[in-house]
Structures are given as structure tokens and as C-alpha cells.
Image: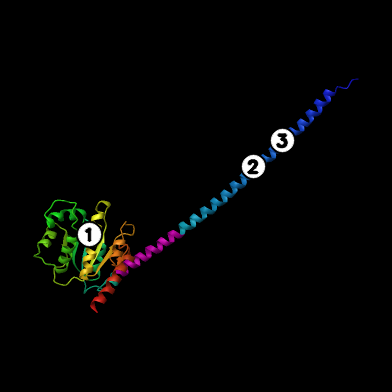
Amino acid sequence: MIINIRYYVLTITSIFLALGIGIIIGFMFDAQEIMVSQKQDIVNQLEEKFEYLKDENNTLKSNLKQERIKNKKYEKISEDLLPLMAKGKLDKMSYAVIDNNNIYKNSEISNLLELSGANIKSITLIEKRTLDNLVNFIYKSSDTHVDVSSSFAKLLVNTLKDMNYNNEFFSYLLTNNIIHIKEENTKPLDFIILTENVNLQSKHKINSFNESIIDYCSKLKLPIIYVKKDSTENINIDIYKNGKIDTINNISSYIGKITLLSFLYEESLKQLN
């Protein structure tokens, strides 16, 4: 019997190939199991993280709800206390409000002053159109590019201070609904309250007017304060810092109202002493 070496070689080779393939397949199954296990671990971790974040979110929502309830209570308390706190606090003081807005009137400021018994001599409403129209009155010109801020500021402050009803400029303000007289009396003006709510189109001219008002009041040593209506307004606060005048933020809130009342009351005590 002749031994076929080729047969044995092929047989041994096939056996080793089969073993190799089996090993490879075994590794593949092991690797797949490892990958599946890792994926499951990642999924479990993500689920745990999601549950944690969900619990955190629910906790934050619950805390926020509780804080809102507290804020509502504080607002209600402030609403009830504000008239009591304000009553008679400013009854010896006289104010003029300059509101850079085209809406009559700033109820937050006016209502607070009225609650405190203050004498609101006038409310002046300024807007871009007002400044443009004043060019014709002051300079007898129709050029809307002329800046009347400085001239108008001086005329307005002098008018508010003296309340000369025979003044041509005062008559112009009344006729054009720029100034609204609240109290017609001869009591001297103690304080000017400046506030604004302007759009981008009128911002430059209004800022220029405000700077002129602050500068002229400073020269006359006439007290002036800037009141910001809303905490979100995009107002250039540097104008007021550079003018070294006090500012009150967010008069729409009760905190803002109480802050303004406290400031004006302290200033009134200084002036009376």
C-alpha cells in the first residue's frame, strides 16, 4: 500500500484551517458579546443619567414653583404696604417728570408720587418728532438734522423751574401737548425726574437731549434723578454715571418703586434741613 503524502498534507492543512476558522469565529462571538455588553452598559448609564436629570428637572420645577408662590406673596405684601409707606412722605415736595416717550403718562412714577402726596407740577413728553419739530420753533428752520438738544434743554428746565404761563415757549409746549400741567401753583420746583423708553430710531437724539438736561440741571444745582422703567431696556447708563446723577432701576417692580420712594424721601429731608 502506497501512502499518499499529498492526502495527509491536505488533511492536516484542512484540520488546522478548520481550527483557525473556529478560533476566529469564537473570537468574533466573544467580541460581539463584549460589544453588546458594553452597549448595554452605556444604555444603562444613559438611562440612569436621564433619570437623574429628570429628577433634577422636577426638583428645579418644584423649587421654581415655590419661589414664584413666595414672590406672589411678597408682591401682594408690597402692594398692600406701598400706599401705607408712601402716604404723606413727599407732601412738601414739588416734582416735574420728563418722560422720553410718546405715551401719556408714566403711571408707575405718577401714581407713586400721587400716593406720597407729592406735588407733580408737570409731565413733559419728549420724542424724536418733538425734537425735530422744535428746530422750526427755536431756529426758524425746517432742517431736521440740526441738534436742538442743548437749546431745548435750557428752555425746558427754565420753563419747568419758573412756570411762566405767559412765556411763548411754554405756550408752544401746551399747544403741542408736549407738557401736561398737573398743579398750577407757584411752589418752587424741588426735583426733576427723568425717564425714558426709546426705540433705536430716536435713541441718538434722545441721548443727546438727556445729556443736555443733566448738564444744565447740574449748572443750576437743580436735583435730578434718572428712573429706568424696565430692567430689560437697552439704555446707555454711562450718560447718567458721567453726569453723576442717581439712577433707579426697574420702576415697574415694587422693589423699584420702594427704592425710588426711599431715595426721594431722603432727598426731601436733606432739602428741608
Is residue 99 or residue 59 the one in the foreground? 99
Residue 49 is marked as none
Is residue 82 or residue 155 the one in the foreground? 155
Q: What span is colored magenta in the figure?
A: 63-82
Q: Is residue 41 left or right of residue 91?
A: right
**Any magenta on residue 75?**
yes
Distance Cα–Cα, label 3 vs label 2: 16 Å
Q: Quadrant of residue 38?
A: top right
Number of other residues with Cα within 10 Å of mark 2, as a class: few under 14, some 14 to 19, many 20 or more: few
Disc 1 target residue: 209
* Magenta-colored segment: predominant secondary structure: helix
Residue 24 is marked as 3
Say which amino acid is labelled 2.
Answer: Met
* Residue 159 image point, x, y percent: 15, 65
Disc 2 target residue: 35
**Residue at (14% x, 60% y) in the render:** 173
Q: Earlier in the sequence, mark 2 or mark 1?
A: 2
